[in-house]
């Protein structure tokens, strides 16, 4: 998972970040956002989550948070983000809906398309057939490294995290798993 939210959100999160290039937008910069995906989104259509768990299962909020923060990392769904009035304002500009053609492709694929109409008249668009990191759209090795480093930042020393990752990625062929556990212990804070 490359986004710190419900997997149903992932295709939409991919295309939001692709359309915007990960740049941060302010509500006043955005006229309208339309995100289209399968009918599965209706299970996570909450617009105003009250806590960080609910935020991970609220697609309109997730889109708004990605637009405001320029990312979908863990902090994008923590309580500070839930309480952020800027994200709440952005939610008002987000429309999520079903594209029946996308629903027809489920469960083989999980397509999504997003259109972001900016206040200056610029239109940003992106689409995907499958979320990044799925079997149909595999992640690049560098993406996996970044994700590991992001998730272990609070637990592993920066200078030890990369060697620990190197050991982890070769653990299946290691003759002794102690090499991995030693690398993790050495990197621990």
Image (spheres, grey):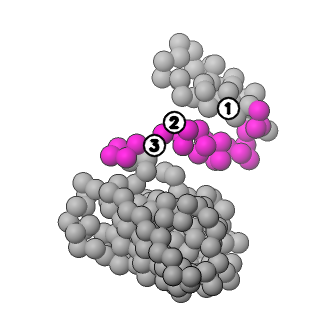
Q: Quadrant of residue 165?
A: top right
- Circles 1 and 2: CB atoms closer than 8 Å: no
User: Label 1 belongs to which residue?
Assistant: 162
From the top left corner, tell me how far across and down residue 164 is, in percent.
66, 29
1 or 2: mark nearer the eye = 2
Q: Secondary structure at mark 2?
A: helix
User: Label 2 belongs to which residue?
Assistant: 141
Q: Name the mark on residue 139.
A: 3
Q: Secondary structure at mark 1?
A: helix
Q: CA distance from mark 2 to mark 3?
A: 6 Å
- Whether residue 87 is in magenta: the answer is no
Q: CA distance from mark 1 to mark 3?
A: 18 Å
Q: Secondary structure at mark 3?
A: loop
First to last magenta residue range = 135-159
Q: Is residue 155 visible?
A: yes
Residue drawn at 37 percent across, 46 percent down: 137
- Whether residue 155 is in magenta: the answer is yes
Residue drawn at 49 percent across, 60 percent down: 18
């Amino acid at each position: 998972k490359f986004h710190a939210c419900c997997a149903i959100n992932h295709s939409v999160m991919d295309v939001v970040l692709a359309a915007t290039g990960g740049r941060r937008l302010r509500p006043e910069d955005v006229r309208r956002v339309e995100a289209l995906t399968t009918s599965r989104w209706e299970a996570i259509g909450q617009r105003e989550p009250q806590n960080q768990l609910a935020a991970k299962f609220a697609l309109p909020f997730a889109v708004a948070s990605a637009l405001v923060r320029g990312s979908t990392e863990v902090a994008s769904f923590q309580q500070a983000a839930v309480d952020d009035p800027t994200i709440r304002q952005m939610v008002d500009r987000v429309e999520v809906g079903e594209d029946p053609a996308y629903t027809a492709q489920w469960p083989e694929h999980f397509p999504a398309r997003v259109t972001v109409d900016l206040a200056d008249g610029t239109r940003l668009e992106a689409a995907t057939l499958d979320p990044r990191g799925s079997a149909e759209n595999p992640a690049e090795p560098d993406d996996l490294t970044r994700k590991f480093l992001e998730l272990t930042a609070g637990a592993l020393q920066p200078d030890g995290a990369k060697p620990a990752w190197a050991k982890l990625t070769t653990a299946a062929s290691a003759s002794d798993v102690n090499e991995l556990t030693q690398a993790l212990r050495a990197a621990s804070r």
